[in-house]
Image (spheres, rainbow, N blue to C red):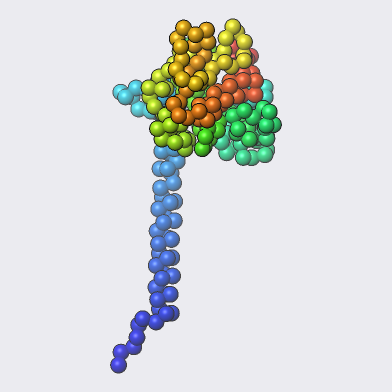
């Protein structure tokens, strides 16, 4: 009579061995694919920066296009360039979770609901023969369901918007998710962040459609239909990052040539 191979011990052994083999395969794949994942993430970052700045050109590679951009890090408190961290590797998103590289925001200040703010930020400059053409600034703030991460690009006058684009968010498709709609994003170019030389940001979304004849039309964007909280979140995000607790000190220094 043949022995019974369907014992509980043998079943457990086969299951454990199968789990080990699968774990090894998955771990090996993760290690082998990590360099490609990092490269893809970097490519996506550069693509979003170029898109916000209106620099995309299908006839050239992303790397070719990005070669015209200079990457620097600024100290948000002083509004000046800094060498305290490496511009090539610094990640403000990770730094915001590090108490040594960030600070908690008072609720009265934290209108963008980001809770903690990195002490440094990476900025991107486009210059031609020493003349500043554009500056691209990372921005983020809370909407309805998520924190929206994106880039706001300005012309060399440091006031006129070139474009705004988000690369990460979890807002409701068809509602708050309309921040990705090219038609809505097409309203941003040409809008003004500030007025009359002041550094108090006026740019933001309104309820309904912008009246082109209104006194503040240059600072207004159509609100997202059915997504009031996301609209308010985007407005607060812009006002925070373009205000005194964000990039206003840096932009002031940049205008004066004192960075």
Mark yes or no: residue 122 visible: no
Q: Quadrant of the N terminus?
A: bottom left
At 54% from the left and 17% from the top, the residue drawn is 203
Residue 167, percent across and down? 45, 32
Q: Where on the picture, by quarter, is residue 20?
A: bottom left
Residue 243, percent across and down? 62, 20
At 50% from the left and 28% from the top, the residue drawn is 228
At 34% from the left and 22% from the top, the residue drawn is 57
Between 10 and 213, which is closer to the camera in this rendering? 213
Q: Quadrant of the C terminus?
A: top right
User: Is 136 above or below relative to 157?
Assistant: below
- In the image: residue 124, left or right of residue 259: left
Between 176 and 122, which is closer to the camera in this rendering? 176
- In the image: residue 186, left or right of residue 159: left
Between 242 and 3, which is closer to the camera in this rendering? 242
Residue 85, percent across and down? 61, 32
Residue 21, percent across and down? 40, 64
């Amino acid at each position: 009579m043949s022995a019974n191979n369907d014992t509980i011990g043998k079943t457990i052994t086969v299951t454990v061995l199968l789990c080990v083999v699968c774990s090894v395969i998955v771990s090996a794949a993760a290690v082998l694919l990590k360099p490609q994942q990092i490269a893809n993430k970097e490519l996506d970052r550069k693509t979003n920066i170029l898109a916000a700045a209106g620099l995309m050109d299908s006839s050239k590679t992303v790397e070719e296009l990005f070669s015209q951009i200079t990457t620097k890090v600024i100290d948000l408190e002083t509004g000046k360039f800094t060498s305290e961290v490496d511009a090539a590797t610094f990640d403000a998103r990770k730094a915001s979770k590090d108490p040594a590289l960030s600070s908690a925001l008072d609720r009265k200040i934290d209108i963008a609901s980001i809770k903690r703010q990195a002490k440094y930020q990476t900025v991107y400059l486009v210059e031609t023969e020493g003349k500043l053409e554009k500056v691209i600034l990372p921005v983020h703030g809370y909407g309805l369901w998520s924190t929206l991460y994106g880039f706001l690009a300005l012309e060399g006058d440091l006031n006129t918007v070139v474009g705004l684009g988000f690369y990460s968010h979890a807002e409701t498709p068809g509602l708050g998710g309309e921040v990705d709609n090219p038609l809505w994003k097409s309203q941003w170019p040409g809008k003004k962040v500030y007025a009359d030389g002041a550094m108090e940001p006026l740019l933001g979304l309104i309820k309904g459609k912008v009246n082109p004849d209104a006194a503040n039309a240059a600072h207004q964007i159509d609100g997202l239909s059915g997504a009031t909280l996301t609209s308010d979140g985007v407005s607060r995000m812009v006002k925070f990052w373009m205000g005194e607790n964000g990039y206003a000190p840096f932009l002031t220094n940049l205008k004066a040539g004192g960075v």
